[in-house]
Every structure is written in C-alpha cells, then in structure tokens.
Image (tube, helix red, strand yellow):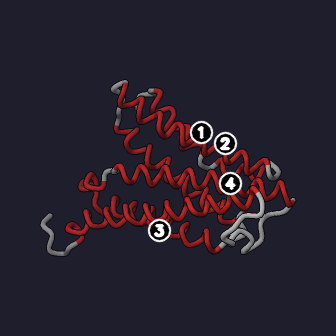
C-alpha cells in the first residue's frame, strides 16, 4: 500500500469508527455526544476529500477502493448501535436502524459469495448519497441526544422524542434526525434491492460457472 494522502485519510476514518463508543466511556455526557458529532463531521468531510483527491491526483488504488466503503460501513454501523442505545431505544429509530444494519450485512454477504464477480456490485452514485444521508442523520441525532442531556440532565426516555412536534431544540434536532434516518433507510433499501437484482442471476443453481 502506498501512503498517499487519500489512503491516509481513509485509514484515519477507519480508525475513528471504534472511537465513537469510546467517547461515551471516557467522556461525560453531553461532551461525549458532541465529540461523537465532531467525529462524524470530520468523517463526512474526509469521505469526500479522499475520493476527490485520489481522482484529481491520479492516486486511486486497490487499497483505497477496498477500505473506503469498509470505513464508511464501520462508522455507520457502530454509530447506529450507539445512538440507538443512547436515544432510549426509540422505536421510531430502531426500525430504520434495523433496515440499515440488515442491508449492510446482506450486501457484504453477497459480495463475499460472488467473489471475483463482486465487481458487479460496485458502489453507485445512489449508494454514495445513501452513505451521506446516513452520516448526516447520525450526526444530527448525536446533536439531539447531546442537547437533550444538556437541557434535562438525563438521557431521553422511551417515547420522549416520538411526537411529531417540538418543544425544545433537542426535540427539533432529534425529530429532524429521525426524518433524515428514515430517508437514509429508504435509500439504503433501494440500493440493497439494486445490488440483489444484479447478483440474482449468479445465485441460480443452473448458473454456469
């Protein structure tokens, strides 16, 4: 692997993924929430920059092509688990989170099964928009949990953020984040079905090797 700037940014984003739960281990709330928010903002920026710089500088590599989507998935999956727990297990968050987690596992399994044919499931523009929507939604939700803890001094209780109106800035941020993550879940489901449709001929028993 060449240690180009795009590859370094990808590795840093991959290393940042496990730091999300560690924020809540080492920092008190709401500082942990805001630190997780900052991590996601940095991750979103580097996600755009590493790809742009790799193309602009002619530094695209197999390592970057492999690690970039893994870094994105690691950030999203770990953060979804954390944010679901710290949002009081809100059912309006659990359902889209389940769709996101299921799709990521499903598509990863398809790629592993296809082996050399996995190039059929290369990242599409819609999949990139999906990842962007996920990261923005999670960042806004971290803002909501942080503001809620700051305003009330305790984590949100189950159902507290499920009403379709806002009584505070934390409610507004959380409800906007829920709207975004539902949008992200829809995009996630669409891209998952698209990948399944592309892989489906290779799942048939009568498909020629």
Asked if the residues shown at circle 4 and circle 3 are in contact, with their CB atoms under 8 angstroms apart, the answer is no
Reading the image, the residue beneath label 3 is: 102
Q: Quadrant of residue 61?
A: top left
Mark earlier in primary sequence (2, 3): 2
Measured Cα–Cα span from mark 4 to mark 3: 22 Å
Measured Cα–Cα span from mark 3 to mark 1: 26 Å
Measured Cα–Cα span from mark 1 to mark 4: 14 Å
Mark earlier in primary sequence (4, 3): 3
Could you say which disc has been placed on residue 142 in the image? 4
Label tally: 4
Q: Quadrant of residue 106?
A: bottom left
Q: Nearer the viewer, mark 3 or mark 1?
A: 1
User: x%, y% of residue 63?
Assistant: 39, 39
Mark earlier in primary sequence (2, 4): 2
What's the residue at 72%, 61% (across, down)? 171
Q: Nearer the viewer, mark 4 or mark 3?
A: 4
Reading the image, the residue beneath label 2 is: 38
Measured Cα–Cα span from mark 2 to mark 3: 26 Å
> Is disc 1 placed on a helix, strand or loop?
helix
Mark 2, residues whose alpha carbon is within 10 Å: few (<14), some, or many (≥20)?
Answer: some
Reading the image, the residue beneath label 1 is: 42
Measured Cα–Cα span from mark 1 to mark 2: 6 Å
User: x%, y% of residue 108?
Assistant: 40, 60
> Is disc 4 placed on a helix, strand or loop?
helix
What's the residue at 86%, 60% (across, down)? 152
């Amino acid at each position: 692997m060449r240690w180009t700037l795009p590859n370094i940014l990808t590795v840093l984003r991959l290393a940042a993924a496990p730091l999300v739960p560690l924020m809540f281990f080492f920092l008190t709330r709401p500082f942990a929430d805001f630190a997780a928010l900052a991590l996601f903002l940095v991750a979103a920026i580097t996600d755009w920059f590493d790809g742009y710089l790799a193309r602009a500088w002619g530094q695209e590599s197999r390592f970057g092509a492999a690690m970039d989507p893994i870094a994105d998935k690691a950030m999203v999956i770990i953060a979804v688990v954390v944010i679901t727990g710290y949002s009081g297990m809100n059912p309006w968050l659990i359902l889209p989170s389940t769709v996101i987690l299921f799709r990521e596992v499903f598509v990863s399994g398809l790629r592993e099964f296809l082996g050399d044919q996995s190039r059929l499931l290369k990242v599409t523009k819609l999949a990139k928009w999906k990842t962007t929507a996920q990261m923005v939604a999670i960042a806004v939700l971290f803002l909501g949990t942080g503001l809620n803890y700051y305003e009330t001094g305790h984590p949100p209780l189950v159902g507290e953020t499920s009403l379709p109106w806002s009584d505070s800035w934390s409610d507004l941020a959380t409800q906007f984040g829920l709207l975004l993550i539902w949008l992200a879940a829809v995009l996630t489901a669409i891209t998952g079905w698209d990948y399944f449709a592309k892989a489906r001929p290779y799942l048939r028993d009568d498909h020629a090797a």
